[in-house]
Amino acid sequence: MYRCKLDIRIFSEDPLLLADVRNIAPLERFEHEVSGYRSFSPEAVRGSDIIVLDLPVAERPEAVRALCKPGAILVFCMEAEAFAVLRTPSLEAADDIWVKPFHRDFGAVRFKKILAGIKHRKDSRLTQTYLDTIIDSIPDLIWFKDVKGSHLKVNNGFCHAVGKKKEDVQGRGHYYIWDLKKEEYEQGEYICLESDEIVLEERRTCLFDEMVKSKQGMRQFKTYKSPLFDDDGTILGTVGIAHDVTDLANMGAELEIFLRNMPFAILISGNDGRIINVNAKFEEYFAAKEKNIVGKPYEEWKHVIQKSLCKTYGEGHFEIRLHGDGEERILEFHEEPIFDVFRNRVGQFCFCRDVTIERTFEHQIWISANTDALTGLYNRRFFYEYMNENRKENQLSLLYVDLDDFKKVNDAHGHHIGDGALELVARLMREAFPGDFIVRLGGDEFLICLVAVFSVFGREGQSAFAKSVGGVSGFGLPARDVREYRHRVERGPGNEAGRLGTAERHSHVRGEAVREVPLLRVFVRFDQKMTFR
């Protein structure tokens, strides 16, 4: 959506600091230009977005801040002795202070955090712009209140209805906004406080019919009010959406307008179980015209869509997965009965919302928590959870794998080559053991988990792994002593074997596979094969 270019200026005699900053890759939707200065220049400070001052200067930090443009990030690098004597105004003038001497990579790490903070603020402002644009584009009245009833934010539709500007409305209560007389306010007429109290007490979205006295006379509103929650569940206030239905000819016309413009897919069925109305979002989600679905039995339609069922939460609450136009969409369904004024059931209200983004984020969070960032394999945490949940139900065979002399590879060629070795081994194991899951325990240690496939790892399985390596030279199966690893299994830290349960442990010969890659020789070793039931 946006593109941002940052002007970064480094005042330092340390060429490494400048080089570290220049080597930092720009973030998404950002680019930056880095300039270095060996002496302080007030002119160079002006107009910069980020200033890192690693030079002794006569000016106090607050004086340097005065040279910066609004919103610029100012970083001071100074010795601990100089930092200790700074006054509060000087500390407040700097956005960050780096106390010297600092680690070689300290500047680069801190600078990345600064860039991330700038991006976060930029994204937050963009999100706020989205919100303001959306609510101001809606002709209905929209407002946000605190728990005391003061209006924190309103849209243009609200201002038009009350005949006041946003700056005159925000922070004020109902009494001032709607120009109520003192006696009317004291009597509690036309102030909508009762409905606010209901929403706060019930902690849910509620629909009200409200009478409001305005400059245009009495107006009838169909109002949705919802509680606003903090991260810890504390209610911060309420949000309301009010539709003026004063001029609607009848409730049928009112309902039609309301339904057609809802941001959720809505379906209404009558007491006979047949569909009587759907809205525009419903037509969009299910690629169905209103005329082709109204009058059809609701249960027949429900039976069709439940073929794409992916999750059930309870009666009348489920999710489906739709595929169309090359995109996947996940919809969450809710079914609620409709009652008349005499509490007789007269139909059913069904609405669904698009939760694709939510489920995608949830999946991404799960992947981050349960997989290794380098190899993409499952991590130790996932393995322990899996074993605790499945060790009593399924037979499981475990193969322990590590890389021979891996430390020598890192020492001789660098960690980036070592990372490449780990990635290669991970890929080879995926190819050799499709359908099973592979775990990176840490470092160069892996587990291959074979679920109820074979109880003994024989020569056929070894050959399959050898073929997956490709171009293997001298893949042999010399008999080796496995007592050392057996001791680790039986007596090692945490007594892993005892926690997982042991029925059999099979010693087996250990094979070595060697593959040539640039600057690297990868050794893959099967140390021990264990079967748990």
Image (cartoon, rainbow, N blue to C red):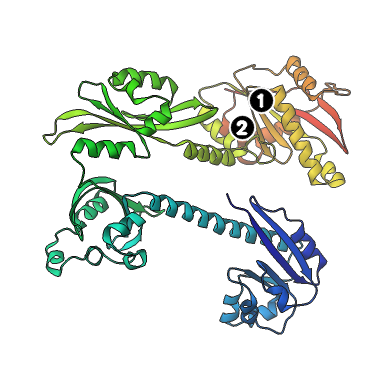
Image quadrant assignment for residue 97: bottom right
The kind of residue on which mark 2 rests is Ala
Given contact means CB atoms under 8 Å apart, are the residues at marks 2 and 1 in contact? Answer: yes
Looking at the picture, how far across and down is residue 509, in whole percent? 78, 22
The quarter of the image holding the C terminus is top right
**Residue 455 in view here:** yes
Looking at the picture, how far across and down is residue 15, in whole percent? 82, 66
Horizontal side of 396 relative to 146 (left or right) equals right
Q: Secondary structure at mark 1?
A: strand
Q: Nearer the viewer, residue 19 or 407?
A: 19
Residue in view at x 64 percent, y 59 percent: 115
Return the residue found at the far bottom: 58
Residue in view at x 76 percent, y 41 percent: 419
The kind of residue on which mark 1 rests is Met
Horizontal side of 208 relative to 112 (left or right) equals left
Q: Earlier in the sequence, mark 2 or mark 1?
A: 2
Q: Nearer the viewer, residue 287 or 321?
A: 287
135 to 275, vertically: above or below:
below
Label 2, label 1: how far apart the Cα atoms are: 10 Å
Q: Nearer the viewer, residue 391 or 416?
A: 416
Q: Secondary structure at mark 2?
A: helix
Horizontal side of 512 relative to 434 (left or right) equals right
Disc number placed over residue 497 in the picture, else none? 2
Looking at the picture, how far across and down is residue 22, in whole percent? 76, 59
258 to 459, vertically: above or below:
below
Label 1: few (<14), some or many (≥20) within 10 Å? many
Image quadrant assignment for residue 427: top right
**Residue 77 in view here:** no
Looking at the picture, how far across and down is residue 229, in whole percent? 36, 53
Return the residue at label 1. Answer: 530
